[in-house]
Amino acid sequence: MKKLLYLFAGLLLLSSCYNKHDEMREQAPSNLIAYDEIVLILADIEIAESALRQKQNAGAEIGEIQEAYYHSIFKKHDVSRVQYDSSMLFYRQDPETMDRIYEDVISRLSVIESEIQME
């Protein structure tokens, strides 16, 4: 009887460790922005946010400017805000993917910085 109790307790413990995260994961949206494109978009957003911080530090009101920057970025990449938001929601489900995305964003920004310095 004791062995049966230990077996039941072991099975209960193992079943509690089952990762339900994969089952709860959102499916990719039908209009998912491709990995490479999301990297380019996020690099542009980082540049825009840097410019906005500069303007804000100089005392400018950035609310409308920020919207204009984002609108311009989405237009440049031919995506909508809704498409961007749903794609980011999907990518954010996997922290490892987000780490890779931001590593690639940093690499992209480094390339841009090098190009500017060479001019």
Image: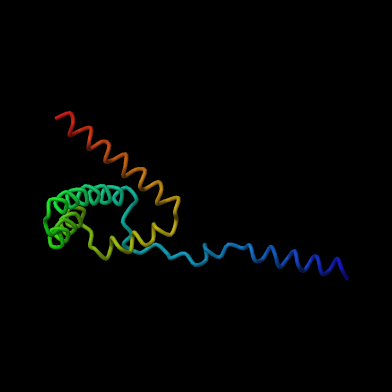
Q: Residue at x 19, y 54 (%)?
A: 73
Choose between 75 and 14: the one closer to the eye.
Answer: 14
Look at the image and name its color scheme. rainbow
Report x, y in % for residue 27. Answer: 42, 64
Does 109 sit above or below residue 79? above
Residue 22 image point, x, y percent: 52, 62
Q: Nearer the viewer, residue 53 or 48?
A: 53
Q: Position of residue 112 (x, y in %)?
A: 22, 38
Q: Where is residue 4, by image quadrant?
A: bottom right
Q: Please identify the residue farthest to the right as the structure is shown.
A: 1
Question: Toward which corner of the image does residue 63 lie, by quadrant?
Answer: bottom left
The C terminus sits in image quarter:
top left
Residue at the (19%, 51%) spot, across then down: 53
Left or right: 61 with respect to 114?
left
Q: 61 or 66: which is nearer to us? A: 61
Q: Is residue 66 above or below residue 37?
A: below
Which quadrant does the N terminus fall into? bottom right
The residue at the point 30 percent across, 48 percent down is 39
Query: Where does residue 58 sit, x and y in percent of width and height?
Result: 12, 51
Q: Is residue 24 left or right of residue 79?
A: right
